[in-house]
Amino acid sequence: MIVEGNLRELGRVQIISGYYSTILVDTVKFMKQHGCKSPLEIYCLFNMINDFYTRSDDVAFLLEHKSMDYSFEVQTMETRGLVTVLDGGVCRHRAAMLNDIYRCMDFDSVTLSGYSINLLRFIYGKKSRRKGLTDLIYTDGVMKKLYNGAKIEDFKKSLNSRGISYKMPDVHDEYWFCNRKMFNHACVMVGGDNRYYLDPMKRTTYYKGEGDEVTLRNRNGLYFFSELGGNKFYWGVPLGKNLDYVDTYNRIMQLPGSDEDDTNIRIKEINTRLEEYKEEARDFASKNQQLVEDIKDMCYCLVKD
């Protein structure tokens, strides 16, 4: 019975993987039809499409917590991204799906794991307790918007009117080597005309300062520290898996780093252009929704077994 159950479960996992591959193929086709050929264009349209998938199911949570063996079996590098279409996923799922799309479109791309922290600090003037509480609530809202892709410059005028300033720390590799923490985030490094660090979860980009090897940053005070050694473990290299990721990583590192200002301008221009395809992206997600439901049903069968 145990062998029979394992074979039945393995068969369903393979079917789920096949469904996910179909979604990837359709997504790549949709992107090509709408002229998305560069890493930034693909990143922007991916984010748009991802906004339209229905998020109303707890199946991904059940999959994560059924058992360690099951989670390890399903959440391989080849299928980790499917959780993105099931319930939106978290950073590792969105990074995995974006990475899968890049690789399907013949870009050098790898997922990166690392430690994410926002070191931006607000400075408050002297004020009443009531005003102080109001300002804390306001800046907390600002931080949430920054994590969702907003820029600190957008709030400069309103912060000044409240008598609030902010300090942007300038830290480098030494900071990380003295303050190592357990990795808590994932993003994507992709090569095109330049080397890009793209974060589909926080809708932001990073750049690497001169002389830094592990420190990525942006103008919002958001830092992402990522070491190759930790990523080899994340990719499963010590277990003999995804060995090509190391070669891919090295090839991308030979490319020039992207400029933060130029990248942000290009993303803004691309998003503006893609607005005309918004309804088509919605229709595309709706068309795929039945396939997503089929995946969910198959996942529920696995959970119940």
Image (cartoon, rainbow, N blue to C red):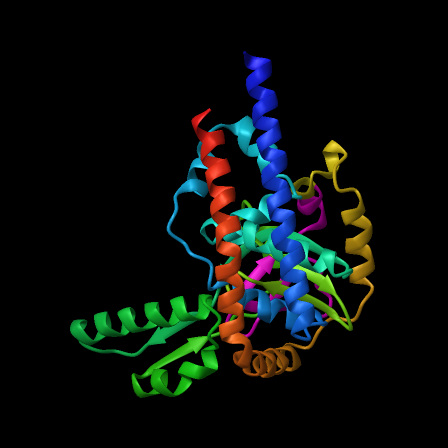
Image location (x, y in percent) of residue 181? 54, 47
Q: Which residue appears farthest toward the top when viewing the image? A: 1
Image check: 212 left or right of 87? right
Q: In the figure, 235 relative to 215: above or below?
A: above
Image check: 34 left or right of 149? right
Q: Which residues are magenta?
A: 204-232
Q: Quadrant of the N terminus?
A: top right
Of 240 and 65, nearer the camera is 65
Q: Quadrant of residue 206?
A: bottom right
Of 32 and 74, nearer the camera is 32
Q: In the figure, 237 relative to 137: above or below?
A: above
Image location (x, y in percent) of residue 185? 54, 52
Magenta span contains residue 152: no
Q: Is residue 37 visible?
A: yes
Q: Residue drawn 69% across and 60% down? A: 189
Of 284 and 35, nearer the camera is 284
Q: Is residue 222 visible?
A: no
Q: Give the tally of numbered discs.
A: 0
Q: In the figure, 120 relative to 186: above or below?
A: below
Q: Residue drawn 58% across and 36% down? A: 74
Q: Residue drawn 34% across and 72% down? A: 139
Magenta span contains residue 227: yes
Image location (x, y in percent) of residue 9? 56, 26
Image location (x, y in percent) of residue 138? 30, 73
Q: Residue drawn 55% across and 19% down? A: 5
Of 34 and 147, nearer the camera is 34
